[in-house]
Image: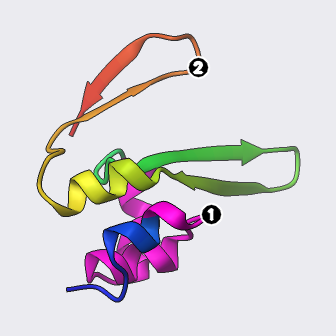
Amino acid sequence: MGKYTDDEIRAMPKITAKIAADYLGISPMMVTPGMRNDLLPIGFAVKKEDRYSTSWSYNIVAERLIAYNHGRINEVQMPDRFGLYRSGG
């Protein structure tokens, strides 16, 4: 069992990869690559590139995180920026 309850997760204004990892009982080093590669369907990973650098930002959705933790999400299905759906995993 993680450090947080479902209600605590729902009440958080922002869920970081560290919080998500603690809640799921996994390493924070598994959360970000999992989201980047569409293997962890708890939110969105957005790649930002400019001429000199690349960075990532993560938007973890409380209800998706809770559903995943309780085994109610087993397939990635999230809208892309064009409003279409993709399925992966």
SS category of the residue bearing label 1 = loop
In the picture, which quadrant includes the C terminus? Answer: top left
Residue plotted at (50% across, 22% down): 80
Query: Magenta stretch containing residue 19, yes or no?
Result: yes
Q: Taking 18 as reference, is 76 left or right?
A: left
Work out which residue is located at the far right of the displayed protein and give it.
51
Amino acid at pointer 2: Arg
Real-space Cα separation, disc 1 to disc 2, in angstroms: 22 Å
In the picture, which quadrant includes the N terminus? Answer: bottom left
Residue highlighted by disc 1: 14
SS category of the residue bearing label 2 = loop
Residue highlighted by disc 2: 81
Give me the disc on residue 24: none
Residue 49, image x, y percentages: 76, 44
Vertical comparison of 3 with 47: above or below:
below
Residue 71, image x, y percentages: 11, 55
Residue 42 in sight here: no
Magenta residue span: 10-37
Closer to the N terminus: mark 1 or mark 2? Answer: 1
